[in-house]
Amino acid sequence: MAWTDDQVLVCVVQDGTVYRYNVHAELCAPQFSMGKECFEQGVVECVFWGNGMICITEGFQIFCVPDFKNPVPCKLADPGIEEYPLCLAVIEPQYTMSGNVEVLLGVGDHVLVVEEDGVQQLGVGVGPFQKMAVSQNGKYLATFTHDGRLLSSLPPEQIAWCGLDSVLLYWDEKELLMVGPNGNPVSYLYDEPIRLIPECDGVKILSNSSMEFLQRVPDSTVSIFQVGSTYQQLCFMMF
């Protein structure tokens, strides 16, 4: 389940039935089904974005609802896999050349890109990938490989983009690691479970006791307060 951009809570059950609730826990729209194949095979996992979602079944078939305002499920091309992918991610329709959703599957030592019209391979020999996350503008893909090149052989529980130039990796109840564009990590420790929620300019960090917002310091703020800036010189002159 997940919240849409319209603050609607979408819940998908195993037989492919989709329920939608408002913030008062009231059904706000008629339920609908992802189709006969989803009902027969069972839904294993869903990935949501703004106002749409994809789901993958136990038969490794992928179905999509591009827009919950017009919930018409469609089936994507058969990925032709025989085991469940190690990880999956979605490139939203507004960021693809075709205008349709693209689903990324971490399979073996490569990534499969699945669309309505076909499937293509990317990054052969680079994987296996344990986790993937697409940046907010749809241009970049962050991955955590099987050999743990970033930090550890233990794959993170969550991975999320923080803005457009850094990636957050979270190990359950242990550590939150931010990796910048030059590969230099910054570590944050938490003594309770957290949840990462990507935003356009940062990441919300939710726990049982607090909500934090982590973002890169904007360039405009740096230019104002850095040593030698005009603003700093004016403050010095005032004193």
Image (cartoon, rainbow, N blue to C red):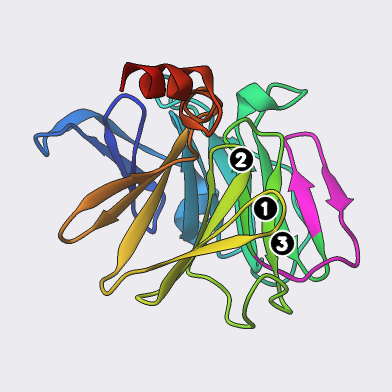
Q: Secondary structure at mark 2?
A: loop
Q: Which residue is mark 3?
A: 106
**Residue 201 or 34: which is nearer the viewer?**
201
**The C terminus - image quarter:** top left
Give me the disc on residue 135.
Answer: 2
Q: Which residue is mark 1?
A: 142
Whether pointer 2 and pointer 3 mark residues with C-beta atoms closer than 8 Å, the reply is no
- Percent across and percent down for residue 35 are 49, 42
Amino acid at the residue labelled 3 = Gly
- Quick one: label 1, few (<14), some, or many (20+) residues within 10 Å? some
Tell me if residue 209 is in the magenta stretch: no
Q: Which residues are magenta?
A: 111-130
Left or right of 140? Residue 66 is left
- Quick one: label 2, few (<14), some, or many (20+) residues within 10 Å? many
Amino acid at the residue labelled 1 = Ala
Left or right of 125? Residue 236 is left
**Residue 209 or 155: which is nearer the viewer?**
209
